[in-house]
Image (cartoon, rainbow, N blue to C red):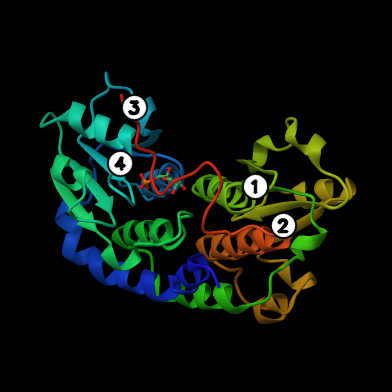
Amino acid sequence: MAYVDAEIASQPECWQRAAELAPQVSADLPDPGERVAVVGCGTSWFMAMAYAALRETAGQGETDAFQASEFPTGRRYDRILAISRSGTTTEVLDLLGAIGGQCPSTVIVADRTSPAARLATAAVALEFADELSVVQTRFATGALALLRASLGTDLPALATDAEVAVRCPLPVDPERVEQVTFLGTGWTVGLAQEAALKCREAATFWAEAYPAMDYRHGPISIAGPDRLVWALGQVPAGLEDEVEATGATFLHSRTHGRHTVLGRWAAGRTPLDPMADLVLAQRFAVALARTRGLDPDTPRHLRRSVVLTG
Ligand code: F1P
């Protein structure tokens, strides 16, 4: 068993703990009405994208997400919110250093003693969600769970979905898949990006991700037999039929049931929350790694954090 297996399995508990923490750290999280930029790199950037879309949709204020190196320094924000498991990622440190005291900044980290925690005005530490695997799973979803709780999402209900996602059979046999494309709409675009990144990192597997409405604008040419299109969240009308007409398999938590007992669980209920569906995608990535004889904890060419020197 790899570290990532245990870390994935612990997500229901992590989400609960994040929800408990949310009211205690609310003073350091964005206030309603603030204009906020959320930044990160890799996985943390994708969580930033998800939160930004959720916050703005919830009417809490204009919220942008940026890869830390692409932050537009000429814009004015009321608060910068950085996400970084390690708290050592160079682009995040550079940005927090450059902002200085010009604007309040909060960083969500796993390690409260990290450089990012010292540079930001405030740090929210999710020590319980830290990880030994290089591949991020529970820190990312734990940070998003905290932020969703701060927006009023019912986290105990979500944790129940996560319980299903860590236990149920996978909706598809990884041995029989040649390529996967994840799709999202609104806040789940970030989740789709993260699901694809897991497949690339853990399994060096060909995985792409797009906003669902953009999929018809070219990426659909990749679809075909033995390939998978996995939609997280809302599915645009007609897309499932168009994908299936190519010979590709279309997956959605509403229809996982065609393939597994999860569908029998889901029959007559609302589909899994997309964040729980991401948990299934994490498990799919780890299973892919195993079918390819790879250690999912140690992706090639990747370390726990990207620290640039010079
Ligand atoms: C971000 C990151 C991850 C990646 C790997 C290396 O780190 O680039 O997205 O999967 O773990 O680090 P952090 O800033 O969140 O520590």
* Residue positioned 64% across, 57% down in the render: 294
User: Could you tell me residue 306's position as x and y percent?
Assistant: 39, 39
Dots 2, 3 in contact, CB < 8 A: no
Q: CA distance from mark 4 to mark 2?
A: 45 Å
Q: From the viewer's perspective, is residue 68 above or below residue 182?
A: above
Badge 3 element: loop
- Looking at the rendered image, the quarter that the C terminus falls into is top left
Other-residue count near label 4 (Cα within 10 Å), few / some / many at <14 / 14–19 / ≥20: some
* Mark 2 or 1, nearer chain start: 1
Q: Residues within 10 Å of mark 2 (few under 14, many from 20)?
A: some
Type of amino acid under label 1:
Thr
**Residue at the spot of label 4:** 61
Mark 2, residue position: 292
Where disc 1 sits, the SS reads loop
Q: Are marks 3 and 1 in contact (CB under 8 Å)?
A: no
Above or below residue 130? Residue 245 is above
Percent x, y of residue 224: 86, 45
User: At 33% across and 22% down in the image, what residue appears?
Assistant: 72
Inspect the image, locate mark 4, and give the three-letter code of the amino acid beneath it.
Gly
Give the number of the disc on residue 39: none
Q: Position of residue 51 (x, y in %)?
A: 39, 49
User: Mark 2 or mark 3, which is nearer to you?
Assistant: 2
Mark 3 is on which residue type? Phe
Query: In the rendering, at what x and y percent does residue 194 appear?
Result: 53, 49
- Comparing 121 with 199, the one in front is 199
Is mark 2 in CB contact (under 8 Å) with mark 1? yes
**Badge 1 is on which residue?**
204
Compare marks 4 and 2 and give the one earlier in the sequence: 4
Q: Is residue 181 left or right of residue 167?
A: right
Q: For the residues marked 1 and 4, what is the alpha-carbon distance in whole angstroms?
A: 38 Å
Going by the numbered disc 2, the residue's amino acid type is: Arg
Q: Residue at x 27, y 21 (%)?
A: 73
